[in-house]
Amino acid sequence: MRVVLLQPPAWRLEHPAGTIADVLGALRIAFGNLVRAHLREGTELGIRCADVFRSGGPVPDQLISAIAHDHLRQAAPTAFLLEGHPQNTAQARALDELLHELGTPLDRVLHLHLSEHEIERRVRHQAARRLCRESSLHCYEPEEADLPGNDTCEVCGGELYQREDDREERIRGWFRSYDALAEPLIQYYAGQDLVVTIDAVGTHEQIAGRALTALREAGR
Ligand SMILES: [Zn+2]
């Protein structure tokens, strides 16, 4: 099965894409990893990306599509789970064209949905996180939104601090950006009747199991 994955910025360290790909028996293609590989290897596409990053401008659709298409042409997977691409409808159209040309059109777009309540819970949980200045191993992650009683590490007495990326406003911003990105894509793919939406709460295994069931049902 060939699937594009739309997932909210909900998992701080590891998200369930790997588990979903395993359950589907599909090759996991993470767009971010493709870009990093090009940068690392200093390919022509990598050099073009580095130039754009240096200038601080947005990466043009053409360059983004070239990176994704280059990989899809070379790997030519019959089954894949593509994450992080496409990011807008222009890229989605270009991807459709390529996949049709390769004779491997998309089967589904899997949309991992989080309720407002769940988003709120995750924002509060992450925003309550504190790290110790003395050791990255001393990490405080309260289950509830309550902040630690004081700002001292219980292990070593070091000062606790909040990472910039754990600031509530920043986390909310990521969710807003994701909504702005996902909405037009969902509409675009809904026009092709490809979208399968599942609830993205629970363990990675539970989410992957739900995805497999929903994709099978949609395939009937
Ligand atoms: Zn400490």
Image (spheres, grey):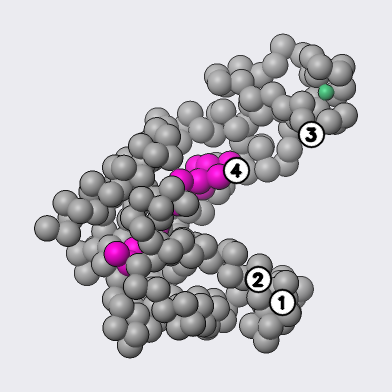
Q: CA distance from mark 3 to mark 4?
A: 15 Å
Which dot marks residue 13? Answer: 4
Q: Position of residue 107 (x, y in %)?
A: 26, 67
Residue 41 visible in the current orientation: yes
Q: CA distance from mark 3 to mark 2?
A: 27 Å
Q: Position of residue 124 (x, y in %)?
A: 55, 28
Q: CA distance from mark 2 to mark 1?
A: 6 Å
Residue highlighted by disc 1: 41
The relative height of residue 215 versus residue 201 in the rendered view (above or below) is below
Q: Quadrant of residue 198?
A: top left
Is the residue indicated by label 4 positioned so its CB lies within 8 Å of ligand 1?
no
Side of 220 relative to 52 (left or right):
left
Instruction: Indicate which label's residue lies in the foreground, 3 or 1.
Output: 1
**SS type, badge 3:** loop
Side of 14 relative to 100 (left or right):
right
* First along the sequence among labels 4 and 1: 4
Is the residue indicated by label 1 positioned so its CB lies within 8 Å of ligand 1?
no
Query: Which residue is pictured at 51% across the width and 78% down the height?
Result: 71
Read off the magenta span.
1-17
Residue highlighted by disc 3: 136
The relative height of residue 171 versus residue 144 in the rendered view (above or below) is below
Q: CA distance from mark 3 to mark 1?
A: 30 Å
Which dot marks residue 37? Answer: 2
Query: Which residue is pictured at 24% across the width and 63% down the height?
Result: 194
